[in-house]
Amino acid sequence: MPKELLSALTIKNAKPKDKPYRLCDGDRLFVRVAPSGAHTFEFRFKLNGVQDTVTLKGSRTLADARAEADELRRVVDAGDHPKVIKRVEHAAKVEAQAQTFEVTAAAWVKAERRRKKWSAAYVKEVEQSLRNHLSDLDWCPVSAIVARIATPLLHRVEETAPLMEEKVARRLH
């Protein structure tokens, strides 16, 4: 089937009908025109004998949709299911975001408290130290904390509370 049968003008001039309908751009890319007049890009494919459709949500223009469809063609031709890949990527992103410095620090304090039998007063001191000196990292995924992010914080601690710098550095480690 020839590619690129549609133009941006054709899509813009597509009139809504009573029922949704599709315009074909070729090679499994379609534009779905809703009764409201809204249009969405769809990529249709067959994998393991089952027909399926992926809505291209990030595509605002025909050029974007064609680029995204090219990527999906490679995925499907490799035998992978685009929806499964998208769900796995989303789960990995959610997991990475859940492992923030704040969550990890709280788990570390809890574990160290048990392991080293910290007193309640010392736990409070450590938590206060983390809040006072490292709270700028609370939002940050642990995997993203590198020297260029941590060094300015440690320099600030060294300037404002020189005796705490070593403790804070150990806690950050």
Image (cartoon, rainbow, N blue to C red):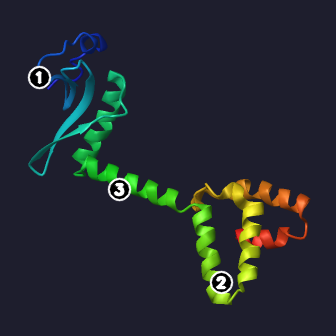
> Can you say which quadrant of the picture contains the C terminus?
bottom right
- Residue 106 x %, y %: 61, 71
How many marks the image carries: the answer is 3
> Can you say which quadrant of the picture contains the N terminus?
top left
Tell me the quarter of the picture where residue 119 sits. Answer: bottom right
Residue lying at the far left in this picture: please name it: 49
Left or right: 157 as drawn, with respect to 33: right
The residue shown at (21%, 18%) is: 5
Earlier along the polypeptide chain: callout 2 or callout 3? 3
Q: Mark 3 points at which residue?
A: 88
Left or right: 133 as drawn, with respect to 141: right
Q: Kindly state the secondary structure of the residue where label 3 is placed.
A: helix
The residue shown at (90%, 58%) is: 159
Q: Residue 171 carries which label?
A: none
Label 2 neighbourhood size at 10 Å, few (<14), some (14-19), many (20+)? Answer: some
* Alpha-carbon span between mark 2 and mark 3: 35 Å
Closer mark to the observer between disc 1 and disc 3: 1
Q: Name the residue under label 2.
A: 113
- Residue 148 x %, y %: 73, 54
Kind of residue at disc 1: Lys
For the residues bearing labels 1 and 3, Cβ distance under 8 angstroms = no
